[in-house]
């Protein structure tokens, strides 16, 4: 037996005296004559003794919100266990969840005490020294000189000082007043203009300094009152605008509410284009109904661990499992077959190829296509717009919608001018017939309308001109000629036989479901991918029946669980958008729509990460062109306050943000339980209680299960000088009232008066019982366990399990689109201009070997505008918007200029099994498990901690590059802008920002595809200094409680911001996310810029040997324990061959 170096050292340092105190091992002879000392068993059992237990929600950003049980001894949270309580939970009507939900919790939940008590915990409020000095000096205007003086340009090298909560609230309040005054009115606008902000962004402020204040409740569903509650502050600062500009109600503006779901790149942006709803997802129990499940770029096995059993159990029920991914991933190990594809969304072509086979082989569900999709609607071949009755019927007026129809009865703000009638060609009369958005399913059949799908027809317009029109289905027959089996194979690299097998399975098995998530949504053309996923499903009637549909899984985004309506009340809006000039002062009463006034406005974080700019470019053909719609337009960023989210650390183009963009931000406030990378670059750090410490009630729910949960007041006492999130917000408002002399700030937080745990109960009641999913519940009944388990009940959906579009399919209710149908086609002007009216394959603006952003098509009904931008243009913003259409035969001969320069490798960045995004990234056990280089002894002092990050690479690729398994390597992206703009090799910040990590051989990945898990804790100036100067070599800051996962750089070293134009339209018609209303254009987390960190190409070079202390091979390679070891007698091969088994006869 070999002794590790760490153990040997410990033994050598142990004195003889101490060694002499060790007792010898008890020797046992005949067990019938003597028995060994068993007192050790009592000590062993004592580990599990506890004095009491309590339940709370383990509530990170992973969609599950598992209710777990904590065990307490001597006031200390000793361990966490699964609670096995879900089968007890009921709703108002007696519907009950089943036992198959049990158990729910993963390894992260088990190690949570190591976060709560860990060294990285925020233990008290802190303020950056330079920022405090700026405040103490009276907040002088931050010109260039002052930004350097107070270290706004070098936050990463400043220090923090501990503050009392009382002092902190004063600085917070005075800082808000100072920022509001600095940028209000004409003087503020001129300052911003002088600083170089785009005029459209300044105009969007409307003269209000409050508009430069940005607030973000990090994935607020994880703790609705405390996290989403920050948006209430964004609405409240309208009062500050009233004071500063001397205006009254209705004439002021609030702050900007930063997004979550879209900023993370988690939304499936094509959903709102297809069916008008923010997202289609299911309760995981709906898997029970599926007969064919397709995991498309989704690793449900690793990333949805508490719910993954619903997927794998499909095989027990005779279902078929399919995995589509570039690599042989964990779902592929469970699947009936795996379809390998080229990385970078080449699989858009795969599903279009499947659609062609389904149509060619007669596998189409014709009735479903006619009754529920837009395939029968006539499209003009001249303008590419859908044909409307008033185009050819003089004096036509839109038909009256039925008074008891879905649109009239349930959607409060419908507008017939924005939802005009459409036209089909009726087979019964052989004429064009007008239909409304209500005429779907059985309702269309009652009108005896039988629309045709094939043919070309002439229509005489009211102008006298005759034009050809076509049912969309006929146009798709033309369109799909580009996706024959050979072309599809060449584009996506999927084997031909598997393309055919997949198409026929979709066409013959019922029901079919497709699941995807970050693996797909993090690419630039995820919109097109999401739309493509619906094509074969819509053709085969697999949208609506239980067990069917196209669903996405990423992030617990669903504020819509607290849906407001004109019959239930405001729901979610009762908390975030209560009128600060007219709040309900009686906390016993609920908030009504009359008391709701949204002064806040949503904004995408992506614009801040895009150097605080909108997408505005100078095109050769049209000059300066604004691609960011007016409804999306951001404002300059001067104050940022975020809760429960590592927003800076996880930002795409992180080093550009912290080294350049944030130099112009006046105040950054981080409210989080741990000192993250975002805290490293903040000005004020607030220390809230963790989930197990909440003193007042908190609530959560999820997008993947039906449970509404309340907890708090029964956990452990706060360990440090920390307080609940909602108390931070209440006390800030009270201090703002004192600083300004205006008690309306404290009045606005009167709903939180009183002591814990009841301090938040009134807000929870207002929010939940005025929503469509909570109407009729009593909050005390839920807390007391009336519905099966204290603190739990089922959300009130019309089905259990919840299944999207059940009402559309079974009750013929319209989808949330202009025509009421699920859409293969979009005729919004932007979609036509950008060549995305059809669902078509596009290469990415960077992650492609071919011409960036090219449209692959010969379809004459796709007519994009390329704005005169040449094919050799390298500017990223121009590549964003260039729309060139080519046939595949031409595309395959083109080259990406980056590919030609050696940047030939995709780097996919999925979520890790052992972290919830960046949460748990540095928790010791998780840090060890999360990679192949975990070592609690840190024998190699180069390691940044007890573990470190790695990139998975094909062994043949590594050998071609001279990289051994375990070597340290550099990973670089486009040097024109990464890791940040203006870098130079001599710049000390470049050393901080250039990514170095370990190489890990993994033959599951294709040659050009590499993988690095995302959302790590990045290197900062402090951690690099520590790594190089600390005796132990840890990348742990010596002046802040911050630990990096890297020696140098971080995952975001290779990413940049991309602002996808299709995410920024003003014309898209869709449903609002949290109320029963329609919207056009922007809505945060709904129709908005999705971040796309996978849109990158990289190259690799060796940095250091992987062996101990930088010499030779990494030990497992040297000793033969890895599959690619150069040794002849490799352990792995011998193990698999059974050569370590010895049979004695």
Image (cartoon, grey):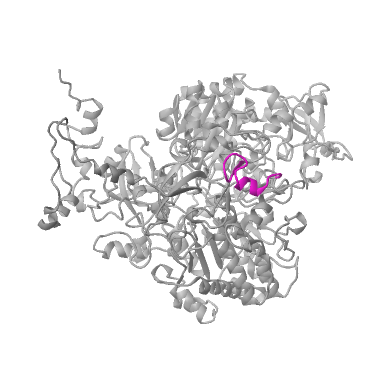
In-front residue for pair 215/842: 215
Image coordinates of residue 281 in percent, x first then y, are: 59, 38
Percent position (x, y) of residue 605?
55, 57
Residue drawn 87% across the image and 40% down it: 397
Q: Residue furthest bottom?
A: 137
* Majority secondary structure in the magenta region: loop
Where, quadrant-wise, is the N terminus in this rendering? top left
x and y percentages locating residue 158 in the rendered image: 40, 71
Q: How many marks?
A: 0
Magenta stretch containing residue 502, yes or no? no
Q: Is residue 624 visible?
A: no
Give the extent of the magenta segment: 775-793
Tell which of 736 and 454 is nearer to you.
736
**Is residue 778 one of those drawn in magenta?**
yes
871 horizontally vs 600: left or right: left
**Res. 752 visible in picture:** yes
Which residue sits at x=47%, y=47%?
1095
Please tell me which residue is depicted at 38% across the width and 61% down the height of the picture.
Answer: 1042
Q: Measured from the top left, where is residue 470 in percent x and y?
A: 72, 30
309 to the left or right of 761: left
């Amino acid at each position: 037996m070999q002794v590790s170096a760490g153990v040997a050292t410990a033994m050598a340092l142990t004195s003889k005296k101490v060694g002499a105190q060790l007792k010898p091992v008890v020797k046992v002879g005949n067990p019938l004559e003597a028995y060994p000392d068993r007192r050790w068993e009592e000590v062993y059992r004592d580990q599990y003794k506890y004095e009491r237990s309590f339940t709370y929600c383990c509530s990170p950003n992973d969609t599950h919100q598992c209710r777990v049980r904590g065990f307490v001894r001597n006031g200390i949270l000793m361990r966490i266990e699964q609670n096995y309580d879900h089968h007890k939970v009921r709703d108002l009507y007696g519907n009950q969840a089943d036992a198959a939900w049990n158990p729910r919790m993963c390894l992260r939940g088990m190690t949570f005490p190591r976060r709560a008590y860990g060294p990285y915990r925020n233990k008290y409020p802190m303020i950056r020294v330079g920022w405090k000095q700026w405040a103490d000096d009276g907040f002088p205007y931050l010109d260039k000189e002052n930004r350097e003086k107070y270290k706004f340009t070098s936050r990463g090298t400043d220090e923090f000082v501990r503050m009392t909560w009382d002092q902190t609230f004063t600085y917070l309040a005075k800082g808000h007043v100072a920022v509001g005054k600095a940028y209000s009115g004409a003087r503020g606008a001129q300052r911003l203009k002088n600083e170089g902000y785009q005029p459209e962004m300044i105009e969007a402020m409307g003269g209000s300094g409050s508009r430069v204040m940005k607030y973000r409740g990090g994935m607020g569903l994880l703790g609705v009152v405390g996290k989403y509650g920050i948006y209430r502050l964004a609405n409240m600062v309208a009062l500050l605008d009233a004071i500063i500009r001397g205006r009254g109600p209705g004439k002021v503006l609030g702050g900007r509410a930063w997004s979550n779901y879209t900023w993370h790149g988690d939304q499936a942006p094509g959903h709102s284009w297809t069916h008008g709803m923010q997202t289609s997802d299911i309760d995981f129990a709906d898997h029970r109904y599926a007969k064919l499940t397709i995991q498309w770029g989704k690793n449900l096995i690793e990333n949805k661990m508490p719910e993954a059993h619903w997927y794998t159990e499909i095989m027990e029920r005779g279902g078929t499992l399919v995995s589509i991914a570039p690599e042989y991933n964990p779902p592929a190990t469970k699947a009936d077959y795996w379809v390998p594809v080229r990385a970078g969304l080449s699989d858009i072509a795969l599903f279009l190829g499947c659609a062609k086979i389904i149509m060619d082989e007669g596998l189409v569900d014709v009735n479903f296509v006619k009754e529920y999709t837009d395939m029968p609607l006539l499209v003009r071949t001249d303008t590419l717009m859908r044909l409307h009755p008033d185009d050819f019927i003089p004096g036509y007026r839109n038909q009256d919608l039925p008074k008891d129809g879905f649109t009239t009865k349930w959607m409060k703000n419908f507008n017939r001018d924005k939802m005009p009638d459409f036209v089909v060609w009726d087979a019964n009369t052989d004429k064009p017939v007008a239909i409304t958005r209500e005429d779907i399913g059985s309702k269309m059949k009652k009108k005896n309308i039988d629309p045709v799908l094939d043919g070309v027809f002439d229509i005489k317009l009211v102008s006298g001109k005759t034009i050809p029109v076509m049912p969309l289905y006929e146009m798709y027959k033309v369109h799909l000629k580009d996706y024959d089996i050979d072309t599809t194979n060449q584009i996506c690299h999927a084997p031909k036989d598997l393309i055919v097998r997949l198409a026929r399975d979709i066409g013959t098995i019922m029901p079919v479901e497709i699941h995807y998530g970050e693996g797909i949504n993090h690419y630039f053309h995820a919109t097109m991918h999401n739309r493509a996923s619906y094509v074969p499903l819509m053709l085969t009637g697999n949208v609506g029946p239980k067990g069917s549909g196209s669903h996405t899984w990423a992030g617990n985004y669903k504020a819509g669980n607290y849906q407001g309506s004109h019959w239930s009340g405001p729901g979610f809006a009762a908390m975030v958008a209560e009128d600060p000039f007219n709040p309900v002062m009686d906390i016993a009463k609920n908030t009504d729509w009359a008391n709701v006034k949204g002064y806040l406005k949503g904004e995408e974080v992506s614009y801040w990460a895009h150097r605080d700019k909108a997408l505005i470019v100078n095109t050769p053909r049209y000059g300066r062109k604004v691609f960011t719609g007016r409804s999306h337009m951001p404002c300059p960023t001067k104050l940022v306050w975020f809760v429960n989210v590592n927003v800076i650390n996880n930002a795409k183009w992180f080093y550009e943000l912290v080294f350049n963009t944030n130099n112009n931000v006046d105040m950054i406030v981080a409210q989080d339980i741990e000192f993250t990378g975002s805290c490293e670059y903040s000005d004020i750090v607030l220390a809230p209680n963790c989930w197990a410490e909440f003193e007042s009630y908190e609530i959560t729910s999820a997008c993947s299960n039906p449970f509404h949960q309340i907890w708090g007041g029964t956990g452990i006492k706060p360990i440090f000088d920390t307080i609940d999130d909602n108390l931070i917000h209440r006390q800030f408002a009270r201090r703002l009232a004192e600083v300004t002399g205006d008690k309306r700030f404290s009045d606005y937080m009167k709903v939180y008066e009183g002591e814990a745990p009841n301090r938040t109960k009134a807000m929870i009641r207002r929010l939940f019982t005025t929503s469509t999913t909570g109407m009729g519940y009593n909050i005390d009944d839920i807390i007391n366990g009336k519905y099966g388990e204290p603190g739990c009940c089922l959300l009130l959906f019309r089905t259990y399990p919840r299944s999207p579009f059940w009402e559309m399919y079974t009750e013929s209710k319209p989808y949330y689109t202009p025509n009421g149908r699920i859409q293969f086609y979009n005729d919004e002007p932007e979609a036509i201009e950008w060549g995305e009216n059809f669902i078509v394959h596009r290469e990415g603006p960077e992650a492609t070997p071919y011409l960036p952003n090219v449209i692959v098509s010969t379809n004459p009904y796709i007519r994009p505008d390329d704005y005169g931008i040449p094919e050799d243009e390298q500017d990223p913003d121009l590549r964003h918007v260039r729309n060139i259409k080519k046939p595949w035969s031409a595309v395959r001969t083109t080259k990406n200029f980056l590919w030609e320069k050696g940047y030939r490798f995709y780097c996919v960045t999925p979520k890790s099994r052992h972290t919830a995004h960046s949460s748990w990234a540095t928790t010791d056990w998780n840090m060890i498990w999360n990679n192949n280089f975990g070592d609690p002894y840190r024998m190699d002092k180069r390691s940044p901690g007890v573990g470190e990050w790695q990139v998975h690479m094909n062994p043949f690729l590594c050998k071609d590059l001279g990289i051994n398994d375990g070597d340290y390597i550099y990973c670089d992206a486009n040097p024109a802008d990464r890791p940040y703009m203006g870098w130079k090799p001599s710049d000390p910040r470049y050393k901080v920002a250039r990514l170095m990590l370990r190489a890990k051989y993994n033959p599951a990945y294709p040659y050009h595809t590499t993988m690095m898990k995302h959302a790590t804790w990045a290197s900062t100036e402090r951690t690099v200094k520590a790594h190089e100067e600390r005796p132990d070599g840890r990348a742990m800051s010596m002046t802040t409680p911050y630990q990096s996962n890297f020696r140098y750089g971080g995952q975001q070293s290779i990413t940049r911001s991309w602002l996808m134009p299709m995410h920024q339209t003003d014309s898209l018609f869709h449903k609002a996310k949290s109320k029963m209303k329609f919207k056009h254009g922007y809505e945060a987390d709904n129709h908005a810029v999705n971040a796309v960190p996978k849109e990158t190409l990289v190259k690799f070079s060796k940095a250091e040997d992987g062996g101990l202390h930088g010499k030779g091979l990494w030990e497992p390679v040297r000793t033969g324990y890895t599959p690619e070891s150069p040794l002849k007698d490799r352990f792995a091969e011998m193990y698999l061959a059974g050569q370590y088994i010895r049979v004695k006869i």
